[in-house]
Amino acid sequence: MPGAEIIRRYGFDPEAQARARARRIELTLWELGHRAALIVTGFALAPVAKPILDTFTRAIPLRWLAVLLYT
Amino acid sequence: MILVLTRWSLPFLLVHLSRMDVRDGLLEAARRPFLRALTRSLVVLLAATPIFAFVYGLSFSPWQKANWNPVFYAVFVSFVELFLAVFYRGRLRPADEALTQRAKELGKRIKVKLPRLRYLEVPDQAPGGAAYLVIWLWDTIVLTRNLRNQLTMEELDVVLAHELAHRKEGWTLALVFGLRVFPLVVFVGFLLPHLCDLYGIHRFGVEALPLFIALCETALLLASPLERALMRWAERRADRLALKATGNPAAFASTMIKLYDGNLIDAAPGRLWQLLFGSHPTGLERVKLARCWKPG
């Protein structure tokens, strides 16, 4: 990774670039963290999604709501 | 279809806008980005499950076999993006006559029809600024208005020429778009049925949604280095065309320096990062390109 001297030689502001670097790292963590979280939770929920859904739909009597909605 | 449109047309602009204030605002609120992202994803997934169950159990019960997963997922991933796109759409204003005239001149030189030209209203004193082209849904070049204060007319020419070059070479963007969809179709289409059989769930049922999301994200993650390489290639082509059209390498270099510094974009992010995430050539590469440019 080029140092501050090269950055200055190319005309960029080293101070702004130092802040840009910190921001890039933060954004990368945000992006990767977000994606990793989606992937991990997705795979983790895959085998238990059906029992959860079955329990939920059985446990709560929603039929009367449907009647209200359709009428 | 929704996934494609929302990820790739309207929010093309958001990729750029996210550099200005939106994601900065989110990040400022998030002291610990990773934990926040993890928590958010968990909350959304867990909250979404009963909602889907509700919808599935009632309204959709006559059509259980219908494939709603892609729709759910598209809405899920693009809700924020859609919201922001609508929000920013309301802040667009027609560009002034002087800029339109210059764009017309450049369009003639590049031999491309001038799309609509719009300003995005941002505070005049806001640092940085961005320009982007949206061609999938509405054919428009958008510039943040603060660019008028920060760049000279010659530098604005560079920005306009770059976007017009993208407009002319729409096929390069179409290629990038294709590379995004292809791994999704192949990876998810191939693995989802197998994994659903393994877990004993219906592949089109709502219970397959977490798996669907995980597979989509994995496919996009795996494909991203190749996709990014193709994006950099398209950007390099647009840069060269802009240099050729303006014939002003000094203005090109100073534009890049102003935009990279103003938007706090790392001009020298390192090779590995650039390989995995870089959507544009690095700032150093672009300044170097201008300095080594020989007209003709």
Image: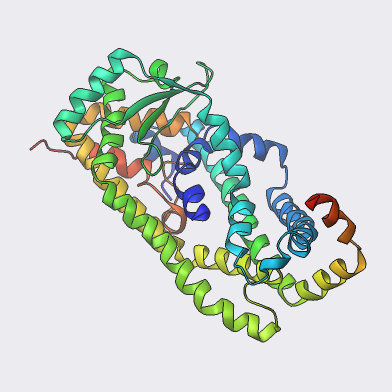
Dividing the image into 4 quarters, which one contains the C terminus of chain B?
top left
Side of B32 relative to B181 (left or right): right
Q: Nearer the viewer, residue B118 or B55?
A: B55
Residue at the outermost top position: B97
Q: Position of residue B41 (x, y in %)?
A: 71, 56
Residue at the outermost left position: B296
Residue occupying the point 51% across, 48% down: B6
Q: Position of residue B289 (x, y in %)?
A: 24, 41
Tell me if residue B46 comes above or below residue A6 in the rendering.
Answer: below
The quarter of the picture where residue B248 lies is top left
Tell me if residue B79 comes above or below residue B225 in the rendering.
Answer: above
Side of B51 relative to B121 (left or right): right
Q: Position of residue B66 (x, y in %)?
A: 61, 68
Q: Position of residue B162 (x, y in %)?
A: 28, 36
Q: Nearer the viewer, residue B106 or B256?
A: B106
Side of B159 relative to B147 (left or right): left
The quarter of the picture where residue B73 lies is bottom right
Residue occupying the point 78% across, 61% down: B58
Q: Is residue A29 visible?
A: no
